[in-house]
Image (spheres, rainbow, N blue to C red):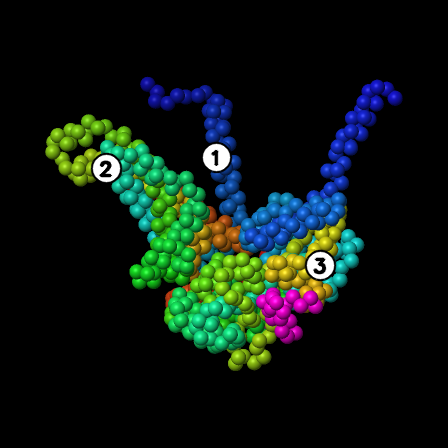
Amino acid sequence: MTFKLKTLTAVGAFALAAASPALAQTEIQWWHAMTGANNDVVVKLAEEFNASQKDYKVVVAYKGSYPDTLNAGIAAFRAGNAPHIMQVFEVGTATMMSAKGAIKPVADVMKDAGESFDPKSYLPAITGYYSTTKGEMLSFPFNSSSMVMWYNKDALKKAGLPEAPPKTWPEAFEAAKKLKAAGWDKCGISTAWTTWANIEQLGAWHNVPVGTKANGFDGFDTEFRINGDLFVKHLTNLANLQKEGVFSYSGRTNTGEGRFTSGECPLFLTSSAFFGNVKANAKFDWSNAPMPYYPDVAGAPQNSIIGGASLWVMGGKKADEYKGVAKFFTFLSDVDRQVKLHTESGYLPITKAAYEKVKASGFYKQNPYLETPLLELNNKEPTENSRGVRFGGLVQIRDIWSEEIEAALNGQKTPKAALDAANERGNQALRQFERTAK
Amino acid sequence: MQKYAHFKGLTIPLLLLLPQLAITVVFFYWPASQAVWQSFLLQDAFGISTEFVWFENYRDLFSKPEYYKALINTGIFSVFVALLSLSLALLFAVMADRQIRGVEIYKTLLIWPYAVAPAIAGVLWIFMFDPSLGMLARGLQSLGVAWNPRLNGNDAMTLVILAATWKQISYNFLFFLAGLQSIPKSVIEAAVIDGARPMRRFWTIVFPLLSPTTFFLLVVNLVYVFFDTFGIIDTISGGGPSGATETLVYKVYSDGKGGTNLGGSAAQSVILLIMVIGMTAFQFRFIERKVNY
C-alpha cells in the first residue's frame, strides 16, 4: 500500500466515522397546529420517542392554526417539499382524502413497515371518521374531541337554578334567561365554533342529515340539507335570543372561549378539549354536560361527532422514512401513553384499551367532565346522519355558512333566508370541489 | 441640439437597462403572468388535477353578490382611510412644524405607529375594542352604546377604518412634515408682512406648495388601503361579520386560503391589478394636472 492510498483510506474511514451517527438517524418531519399546553404535549411526545430508540428522529414544527398548517402542507407539497406527517383538522379530511398520490394511507404505512396494527383496537367513533367506507384507515387519529356544554356552577346557584345543568335546548334557553336576570346581562349562553355547534353537531345529535349521501361519506356528489326545519328552528331561536341579549354570538372559531373562563358566559358550548384552559383559568366551580337537544325531535339525542385532528402521512417518501413513521404511530398507540394524553390534555383516548383502563381506575368519578364527550359519542350506534361529515372544501364552506348565520343573528336576513343562501352557496362550493376531485 | 443622448445599436442600451429589467421580470412580470395563467385554471388544492376553463373563474366572480359587496366595502374603506389619514396627518404635521417645546418627542411619538406590523396593529385595536375584553369597549357600553363589532357590521367597519388610519398617519405625517419644512420661510414671512392671517396663509400658500406631496401620498395611500391593510382586517374581524369588512384583497386571501379556490383567487388578483393600473393612470392623467411642482 502506497503512502497516498493509506492516507486516503484513513481519511475515508475518518469521514465515515464522523458521518455515521448522522447517517444512521432518519429524520421525520411532523408539522402540527398545537398551541399552549398541547404544544408541550407534542414536543414531549417527540422527545420521548427520540429517546426511546436510536434510528429515527421526529422533528416537530408548529405551523400556525389548523387552516394555516393545512395550507403550509399543501404549499410544501406543491413545492415538492412536504413533511412526513401532517396534522390536519377533521374539517380538512375530505380535502386530504381526495388528494390521491399526495398522501399514503396509514393502513398501508403500517402494513409495509410490518408494524402490528389492528384498526379494531381504536374507538370506532373515531376511526370511522378517518376510514374509507370499506374500512381502510387513511389517517392516524391523534387528538380527537367532541362538543360539550361547559357550565358555571356558581352562576347557576346564584340564579336560583337547579344544580343539574339543563338537558334540552328549551331548558337551556330558560336557564340563560334566568342567568341574564341574575346579572349575566351580556351573555347567558353562547357557542364557539359556530357551524360545528349549530349545524354539524346539531344535525348528528338529532339524527338529521347535514347533506345527502350519508353526509358526504358515500361520494362527493352530495348536496347540503341545512335549510331544513331543525336548522331553521334552532337559528330562529338563537336570533331571537340574540336580540334579547340572552344568547350572545362569540365568533366563528374558539376565540370567544375566554368568555366562559372569565365568567362572562355561564353556559358555553365548545370542544371538550377546552378542558386544559378551563382547569387553568376558571376561578369558579365548573363542569360540563352533554349538548342540549330538542325533545320534540324523535330519537334525540342520537350521538355526537368528533372534532380535533388526525395525522396524515404524505406520499413520495423513502421506505426507511415510512418505517420510522410507522414505529412512531405504534409508539403513540401505547396504552399508557394514551391514558396520560387523555387525562392531561382532555383529548379523547383513541384506543379502546386506554379508555377501559381509565374507566377501571375510577378516574371519571372525580373527573366526570372528561367522560362526557365519550358518552356523547357512544350514546347510540352511529347512523348515516351521525357518523360524521365529509364534505370537500369544508374549510371554505364553514366560512360561507358563518357569514350567513351572522347575517341572521344581526337581523339582516331572516333565519330561513340565511340558511337557504348558506345551503345554496355551500352547494356551489361542493360542485367546484367535485370537479377538481376526480 | 439633440435633446437625448443616442447610442449606436441596441447592445449598450440593453446592457444598461438589464439589471432593472431583470428585477422587474423576476419580481413582477413572472409572478403576474403566473396569476393570469392560474386564473384560467380549475385546480384542486394539491395541484394534482388541472383543467383549463377559460373565463369561467371570472364569470363565476361577477355572478356572485359577495364580490360586489367586497367591491363596495373596498370603496368605503379606502375613501375613509385615505381621507382620515391624510387630513389628520396634515393637521399633526402643521402643529409639529411650529416652534414648540419638546417638538422632537412629539415627532418621534407620531412616527412610532409606522413601525408596528399591520397584524400587530390589528391586535392592539381589538384588545381595546373587543366587546368582552376591551377596556374602551367597556367604556362605550357603560355609556349606553351597544358596541359589538363581532356582530354589527358598521361597528366592525369603523374599527378597521380606525386601525388602518392610525397606522398610516405616521407615514403621511413624515412626508407632510418634510414638505412643510421645504417651503421657503421667506414666502411665508412676506405673507405675514402683507397681513395674511394663519388660515389664509395656509390655504393660499402652504397647501398649494404641498400639492406634490399630497398627490404622491394619495397614490401611496390608495395602494396601502388596497393591499397592505390585509393583516389589520385579518386580526380584527376576519372579514366578518357577514362579510361586512371583506375588502377585495382580503377576499383574494380568504378564497385562496385552504387552497380550495386558487383559480377564483387568481382571477380576483388579476382584476385587482387591472383596477390599480387604471386608478394610477387616472390619477396621473387627471389629478396630476392640478399639482404645482
For mark 2, does the 10 Å Cα neighbourhood hold few (<14), some (14 to 19), or many (20 or more) residues?
some
Quadrant of the rendered image containing residue A415: bottom left
Specify the label residue B24 is tagged with: 1
Q: Which chain carries label 3?
A: A
- Same-chain status of marks 1 and 2: yes
Q: Nearer the viewer, mark 3 or mark 2?
A: 3
Q: Which chain carries label 1?
A: B
Specify the label residue A336 is tagged with: 3
Q: Disc 3, disc 2: CB below 8 Å?
A: no
Q: Disc 1, disc 3: CB below 8 Å?
A: no
Q: Give the range drawn in magenta.
A: A360-386
Would residue B102 be seen by someone viewing this image from the given angle?
yes
Q: Name the residue under label 2.
A: B207
Give the Cα distance between marks 3 and 2.
75 Å
Give the quarter of the figure containing the C terminus of chain B: top left
Residue shown at 63% from the left, 61% from the top: A343
